Image (tube, helix red, strand yellow):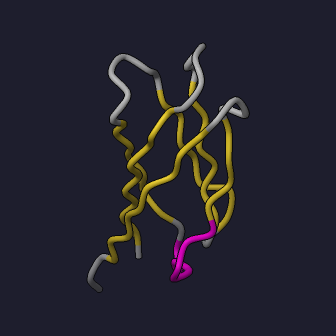
């Protein structure tokens, strides 16, 4: 059975957290990874169900741009 890959971009303002609904639900859940374009900000990403991930950042400033990428089945 092959893997499925999904990705996107999310910008946080002062909330520093968001929920992203994936375009396609995974059948078995996903493995996740994330990168950002804001320098030294720490990013957290976790699956909350088969079609939703949660993003968080620790940026003390205003905006944080987060590129996210998930792989699963």
Q: Position of residue 59 (x, y in %)?
A: 55, 19
Location of residue 73 (image quadrant): bottom left
Residue that sits furthest to the front in the current view? 62
Q: Is residue 30 magenta?
A: no
Identify the residue at image location x=53%, y=46%: 11
Q: Position of residue 22 (x, y in %)?
A: 55, 72
- Quarter of the image with the N terminus is bottom left
Note whether 63 is above or below 30 in the view shown. Answer: above
Residue that sits furthest to the right in the current view? 15
**Number of numbered discs on residues:** 0
Q: Position of residue 37 (x, y in %)?
A: 33, 35
In the image, is 34 to the left or to the right of 2?
A: right
Identify the residue at image location x=59%, y=43%: 55
Q: Is residue 26 magenta?
A: yes
In the image, is 14 to the left or to the right of 60?
A: right
Identify the residue at image location x=37%, y=56%: 69
In the image, is 8 to the left or to the right of 45?
A: left
Identify the residue at image location x=68%, y=47%: 18
Residues in magenta, as a range? 21-28
Location of residue 47 (image quadrant): bottom right
- Chief secondary structure of the magenta portion: loop
């Amino acid at each position: 059975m092959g893997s499925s890959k999904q990705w996107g971009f999310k910008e946080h303002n002062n909330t520093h957290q968001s929920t992203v609904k994936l375009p396609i639900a995974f059948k078995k859940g996903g493995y996740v990874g994330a990168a950002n374009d804001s320098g030294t900000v720490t990013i957290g990403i976790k699956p909350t169900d088969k079609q939703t991930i949660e993003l968080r950042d620790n940026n003390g400033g205003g905006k944080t741009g987060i590129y996210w990428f998930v792989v699963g089945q």
